[in-house]
Image (cartoon, grey):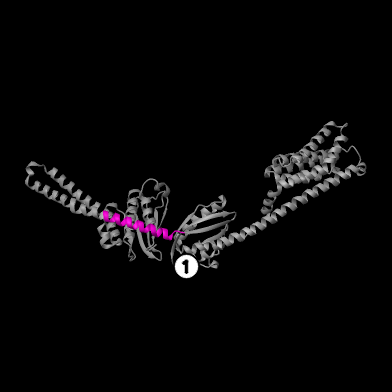
Amino acid sequence: MNLGLTYSGILSSFDVVKEKILDFTFLVFTLLIGPLYLYGIFWYGFTDILISIMNSLILISLITILIFIKRIRVDFKKNILLFILVYGNLYSVYNYGIFSGSQFFMILTFGLATFYYPKWMAISINVGIAISYISFMILYTNEILIYDISPIKFASNGIIWLSDFLLTLMTIGIGGFALNKTFLAYTQQIKEKIENSKNMHYTIENLPIPVGILNRNKEIIHVNKQFNTYFGYKTKDIPTFDDWMLKVYPEPFQHDRKKEEVELLMKEGFKAQHIAPIEFHNLQTNNNELKSVEVHYTIIGDMAICTFNDLTERKRQKRLIVETMMQAEKKENGRIARELHDGIGPLLSTAKIYAHSIGNSCVYNMKGEHIERLNHLLDNSIIEIRNIINNIGPQILEQYGLSKAIQSFIEHIQPISNIQFEFNNNNVHVKSKLIEFALYRSINELINNSIKYASPVSISIDMSENSKGIKLTYKDDGIGFDYEEARGKGFGLENIKNRIDNLGGDLTYLTSIGNGVYVDIQIPEKT
């Protein structure tokens, strides 16, 4: 497992010890350079009062910070140190040019700015220091600035030699301390990562649920034993997420749709370091079992730890509840249908006969137009009652099955819609009455929606069987629609989705404005 032993890991380790390094810098700076500031106070005490005051302020600041170092915030300390270093660099190079030892101040300023300040602030500080050094170089090389004393006197001045030695010692000491502390923290970080990796590996391996780990490149880094047992695939068979998707969703259409959805969520999830749980329905295992799972993701850098919670039994229980409810609903609908058929139907038929008799015997008291209207109203009432009966409990579905019921519905609707229908049954026999009822209602809703909103020329319905159960596809060549927008405007689409979901099936819409509608329904015979 990749532990992230990179340059970013070293920087992360530096962040842990950066305050210690800053405190050490103040200690060394005060002890080694403090005496030089004290010497400068007396040296310039009578010749340059301003420089003497500046040296006094710097020395007092160093001593004060050293005394109260644990109580002072890091931001304040780094700003004070930056001021001292920049002042030391500018003062040295201005007064002594190349012999000033300003390079030591520049090195420390570069380190402080780079590791303690935000990116653009650090760049500005370093560029400013470089520009000032180049500016002084131009001034000296063009003899606009000149030394007050000769280089020979510089070489014979013991204070200059001592200053350079102390600055060299300070720079080496601070640099060495910083590297030592950083790499000690880095080593500790590596040890902790290795230990955490071992603990995590042990925990994952012994979890009672399937767990897989993949990286940003969709490579499966590790799966536990429960994962292999649950899905029935060996680790070598699924080296990547794409390989796993091909195994569990072998059907191209279903595979492509789900893969596109999950890849988009994972891409955004790695960016935001969070992925919401994703449900996978009707996964095909190596034992040809259909499973449903909810996958939870924990993002750690470039890795996603995926835990698979089984929903198969929950969906089975849900289906049992839905079946019971649908059977009760169906029974009640049947009772209502019988009441309408046996009660209202005969009454209306009798009323029609009675009206007809009145028309024959009492024509002299009634106008023919009224009699014709009465007959027309009664005819429409009987037709309406029959439609209600058929809608509540379609007798043809009960007696002859789904294919005949769909064909009958098409034959009933085609003459009044002028739509060319194509229905392919492919000799499918649906065993479950509940699935028959759900598919019949869904097709009714789809056809009605097409006629009402889409203005299609043709509609095709194709029903087939595969290893996962019953597959039904519905196409029209109408004007199409925006699915997400349409869902909020009525209950039709949601009703279809709920029917299919309650039976453990999958429903997929492919549509857009101007491109017709394609609907894919897959319902397992057993879940």
Residue 329 location, quadrant? bottom left
Measuring from the top left, give residue 295's x and y in whole percent. Answer: 49, 57
Measuring from the top left, give residue 436's x and y in whole percent. Answer: 32, 60
Q: Nearer the viewer, residue 19 or 461?
A: 19
Pointer 1 local density, CA inside 10 Å: few below 14, some 14–19, many at least 20: some
Left or right of 203 on screen, residue 379: left
In this picture, is 188 found above or below 149? below
Residue 283 location, quadrant? bottom left
Q: Secondary structure at mark 1?
A: loop
Residue 112 visible to an observer of this rendering? yes
* Quarter of the rendering occupied by the N terminus: bottom right
Question: Which residue in the structure is indicated by mark 1?
Answer: 286
Q: Nearer the viewer, residue 380 or 435?
A: 435
Q: Nearer the viewer, residue 200 or 223?
A: 200
Which span is picked out in magenta? 310-332
The total number of labels drawn is 1
Measuring from the top left, give residue 211's x and y in whole percent. Answer: 53, 61
| Residue at position x 68%, y 55% in the image | 188
Magenta residues: mostly which secondary structure?
helix
